[in-house]
């Protein structure tokens, strides 16, 4: 289950795919691409959730993997199911 503060949609090639129709993200939310290997999913996450230590750890992981100058959608190299559990845990 995805929390009320985040939503997701799947896309087989969502990491930086400009050919997809642009999605408008509501103010106070950030689009995030999560996944490793073939399993990749897009989420729209409330900026409030990024204050939580678990999310900060995932952001540090992304910085180690991709650097601080990512272009486009924020990418987090994390298992999708793990990310869902983190969202559920910190949203309760």
Image (cartoon, grey):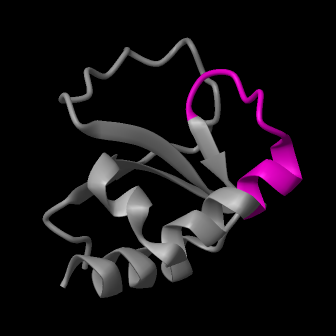
Quarter that holds the N terminus: bottom left
- Name the residue: 42% across, 58% down: 50
- Is 68 magenta? The answer is yes
Corner quadrant of residue 61:
bottom right
Residue 15: x percent and y percent?
64, 35
In the rendered view, tell whether residue 9 sits above or below residue 73.
below
Give the left or right position of residue 4, taking residue 20 as reference. left
- Is 62 magenta? The answer is yes
Give the left or right position of residue 81, taking residue 36 as reference. left
Residue 9: x percent and y percent?
35, 49
In the rendered view, tell whether residue 43 sits above or below residue 18.
below
| Residue 42 vs residue 74, the one in the foreground | 74
Quarter that holds the C terminus: bottom left
Q: What's the magenta region?
A: 61-73
- Name the residue: 32% across, 80% down: 90
Give the left or right position of residue 3, taking residue 67 as reference. left
| Residue 11 vs residue 36, the one in the foreground | 36
| Residue 22 vs residue 91, the one in the foreground | 91
Q: How many labels does the image show?
A: 0
Corner quadrant of residue 68:
top right
| Residue 26 vs residue 22, the one in the foreground | 26
Query: Extreme left residue here?
Result: 4
- Name the residue: 64% across, 26% down: 16
In the rendered view, tell whether residue 46 sits above or below residue 54.
above
Residue 78 shows in this picture? yes
In the rendered view, tell whether residue 70 sits above or below residue 22.
below
Residue 29: x percent and y percent?
28, 39
Residue 33: x percent and y percent?
55, 47
Residue 46 shows in this picture? no
- Name the residue: 84% across, 40% down: 67
């Amino acid at each position: 289950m995805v929390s009320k503060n985040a939503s997701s949609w799947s896309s087989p090639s969502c990491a930086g795919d400009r050919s997809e129709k642009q999605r408008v993200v509501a103010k106070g939310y950030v689009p995030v691409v999560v996944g490793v290997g073939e399993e990749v999913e897009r989420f729209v996450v409330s900026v409030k959730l990024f204050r939580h230590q678990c999310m900060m750890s995932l952001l540090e992981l992304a910085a180690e993997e991709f650097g601080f100058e990512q272009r486009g959608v924020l990418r987090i190299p994390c298992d999708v199911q793990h990310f869902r559990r983190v969202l559920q845990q910190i949203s309760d």
